[in-house]
Amino acid sequence: MSFTRRRLVPPTLFRQLFEKDSSTYTYVLADVSHPEKRALLIDPVDKTVDRDVALIRELGLKLIYAMNTHAHADHATGTGLLKSKVPGVLSVISKASNATADLFVEPGDKIYIGDIFLEVRPTPGHTCGCVTYVTGEGPEQPQPRMAFTGDALLIRGCGRTDFQGGSSSQLYQSVHSQIFTLPKETFIYPAHDYKGFSVSTVEEEMKYNPRLTKDEEAFKSIMENLNLAYPKMIDVAVPANMVCGLQDPVAKST
Ligand SMILES: [Fe+2]
């Protein structure tokens, strides 16, 4: 007697890592069924690159992509350092960010590591080049799906919209059209958390996000009246992140 067994959940490896100074989450995703155990990193931070490289070595993964959801203003990306420490790694960012990277992604693109892929959804508003990376749809992809939302959607919050080409109206439209249309059980994994949360779902944020449950006008009013301080790292982090986290020595010393 012979039969075939349908593979419902692919052997996915997933890790959520934290950088405490900027409260940034870095994510590892790998297809451990692939002979090379192909992996990617989302939003690595320069200060924690050695930790990330050590973990990847311990787990026997082959790092293919070091990706950013956007050009961050609060920390320097680890993508440039990763490229120097792990030969062959490709840095990835959206074309709309106007930053430097090896690969530029656009809405609808798919990024494969083995059989697993991430699709690129445009979620501008926090910056003009923000994207959300979402695991693929279908029985061969991780279930439930996972959305890496960067600063577009935080757990019970969202990124500010007053710098880097930000627009509260655009952010509202992005979240409602590109994230809240995903299956309600989709996990939300943001780039930051300042309250101790680690994961949410589309359903939870649609019900309880104190900003994005409002109508667009109320949302815009909230965003315009946050009275946030000037981001303390922005003048260093953004120029660095526009060149993959590595500024040339002359630019750095000025
Ligand atoms: Fe940001």
Image: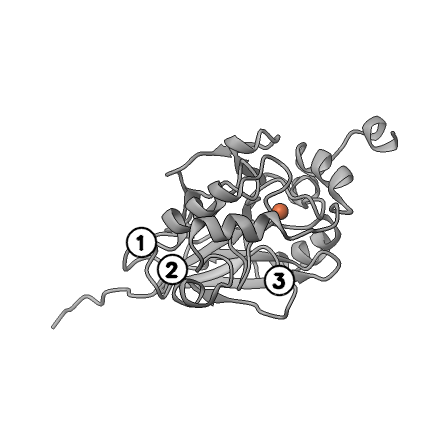
- Judge whether residue 7 can be spotted in this image: yes
Category of crowding for the residue at label 1, using alpha-carbon neighbours closer than 10 angstroms: few (below 14), some (14–19), many (at least 20): some
| Above or below: residue 187 compared with residue 77 | below
Looking at this view, is 83 or 57 the one in front? Answer: 83
Q: Nearer the viewer, mark 1 or mark 3?
A: 3
Looking at this view, is 152 or 162 the one in front? Answer: 162
Q: Is residue 180 left or right of residue 217?
A: left
In the rendered image, residue 76, in percent from the top left (x then y), is placed at 71, 44
- SS at circle 2: loop
Q: Label 1 belongs to which residue?
A: 137
| Residue located at (72% from left, 33% from top) | 239
> Which amino acid type is shown beneath numbered disc 1?
Glu
- Judge whether residue 42 can be spotted in this image: no
Q: Which mark is residue 145?
A: 2
In the rendered image, residue 88, in percent from the top left (x then y), is placed at 59, 38
CA distance separating discs 1 and 3: 26 Å
Q: Are marks 2 and 1 in contact (CB under 8 Å)?
A: yes
Q: Label 3 belongs to which residue?
A: 193
Q: Is residue 131 left or right of residue 109?
A: right
In the rendered image, residue 90, in percent from the top left (x then y), is placed at 57, 38
| Residue located at (46% from left, 67% from top) | 208
CA distance separating discs 3 and 2: 20 Å
